[in-house]
Amino acid sequence: MDDQYLDAFIRESEEAITELNNSLLELESDPSNTEAMDSIFRTAHTLKGNFGAMGFDNAANLAHAMEDLLDEMRQGEMEVTPDLMDLVFAGVDQIEVIVGEIEEHGESGTETDEMVEELRAVLEEGAAAAGDTETADDGDSSDSDESLTTDADVSDADIDGDAVDEQVLQAEISVGESDMLGVDSMLAVESIEGRFDILDSSPSRADIEDGEFEDTFVLYLDGPDAATVDAELGTTGKVDSFDVTDVTDELASGADTGSDAVDESDTGSNSSADSDPDAEEEHSVDEIKSVRVDVDQLDDLHGLVEQLVTSRIKLRRGVEKDDLDSTGETLNELDKITANLQNTVMDMRLIPLKKVVGKFPRLVRDLARELDKDIEFEIEGEDIELDRTILTEISDPLMHILRNSVDHGIEPPEEREQAGKPRTGHITLRASRERDHVIIEVEDDGAGLDVEGIREKAIEKGVRSPEELDAMDDSAVYDLVFHPGFSTADEVTDTSGRGVGMDVVHDTVSQLDGSVSVDSEPGEGTTVSLRLPVTMAIVKVLFVKVGDEEYGVPIKNVDEITGTEEAKQVNGQEVIKHNDEIYPVIHLDDTFDIEGETANGDGMLVRIRESERQVALHCDSVNSQEEVVVKPLEGILSGTPGLSGTAVLGDGNIVHILDVVTL
């Protein structure tokens, strides 16, 4: 199959699935919305046709069954009920899994017969049958809750905590009645191993593959959350029924973590999908692989390339004739052309925020339904554009924030009613543009953060001393939730407490050269604000010299450059004073262990903007300013304090770019 056509099919399918999810949400909130119903039917019909045309018959059959069911709803022959919508959403989820498999492998191994049968059964028996019908994703799991009993003792599992990347999920599995129990079990285990890392098993792997167990066996899997494992096991061949439990906390408690088990869960959930029923959707936004480019931008790009070619020819002739005047003029032309080229390409990389947030309404809906909460979710400013890389990176942080708002922000309906608030909570994701930055806010009207509770937890965890906390205002105290492992939740739920993943949010936003803050009013709600640059690839930096080393400081972080005579000693700490504010001095030669001769007491001080960090950097000398392409640090160097990336200069030398926040 032509890769070009396949890629176009995948992108169109992803967009159609997002559109279908959001239209279904509109229909669920207002069953009389004929416009939403028509959109749903058209999208399902398009998916069916596209799957059939590309030869993916299993998905086409599923989409066809969904189309027939939706047609009954559109004609008013079937009532829109929560159970019926759950079934339809499960069908959409399975279609999304299939699209993901096609993208990764060029084909899908997901069996859709069971889901198709369930949809057809509802068509024959009516909407009431949907409540008695198991969905392909969780039917097996709920059925197994009654039929499977986990005898395996978690404390007996031999699991190396350092080998766990996400969460430890205990999956009790049955392959059903089988004439070749060992063979079927082996095939099931191998299929599961292709999707998750197997940390341990009960009984041993050899006994499982020999069929030496009664009814069920247990696998301990490294996965993001129970919902994701549920979804995968529901489409795994040879698995008849299963029961999945998150045992991360139990293992942490078994390791004598005591009350710190909460922190183990917190940090373990940092990169997880938590209890998101749509965990598969996270993978579809991990990387934005296509952009739509305006024809005018392509024309501009073509024109600039033509100018570039012309200037290259002129430059070569000038060099050959040793005509320095002509060469200088041509270089000036090249400066203008490359600047325009840079701006055009940057504009082409900009993608509307809705590319990522379009899937969030379904996320909030499923979490709210799981937690028995009534929540209205609203998105404002989804047409605001950001660089493709930034959009890709912030998808997970935004999901963490939304989960925390749904789980521990919005109160249960009865609790809200007792507090004199509407039973239905409200969450708003709002984006706005401020010059070269975008502000993204997630606001909820829930219980808010308990500032005294945060202070107590900070003292208990040793994050801050009582004296430091007394001197901090409420805003600074709220920001403590970004400290690794910090959580004020009384109990750890599948979707986590406020502190779960918030350190990851902070780290990710900081790496993108942005900032994040929290504002809260007890009983009124909480707002988490992300401030992000629109683009990030090219940065203007100030070069400073320390010994034989050279570093780059982003110009936007620099407020003033002064001589070292401004510095004074206060309580043994070298500081400078500006507008009645004290700025501690950081000596770069000490920070980076620079060998050789440095300026010692002489040199220059680079004062950093107060909005970034209230410090001044001591260096030997300040050199030039230049625009550079910053490459983030990768591998073992990723996250190195004080460094945000590297840049290659025109002479081939590599310069480290400083991160003034973590320095």
Image (spheres, helix red, strand yellow):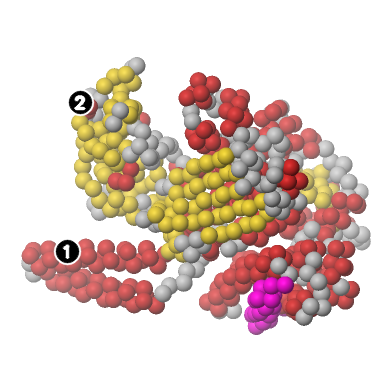
* Direction top: furthest residue: 571
At x 38%, y 36%, the residue is 613
> Disc 1 versus disc 2: distance between alpha carbons?
40 Å
- 192 part of magenta stretch: no
The quadrant holding residue 34 is bottom right
Q: Is residue 648 above or below residue 257?
A: below
Marks 1 and 2: CB-CB under 8 Å? no
Residue at the spot x=61%, y=43% of the render?
Answer: 524
Which marked residue is nearer to the observer: mark 1 or mark 2?
2
Q: From where the camera sits, is residue 183 visible? A: no
Q: Would you say 267 lies left or right of 171 here?
A: left
**Range covered by the magenta-colored residues:** 32-58
For label 2, the SS is helix
Please name the residue that numbered disc 2 is placed on: 565
Residue ID at (30%, 28%): 580
Looking at the rendered structure, the kind of residue marked 2 is Glu
* Closer-to-camera residue (389/490): 490
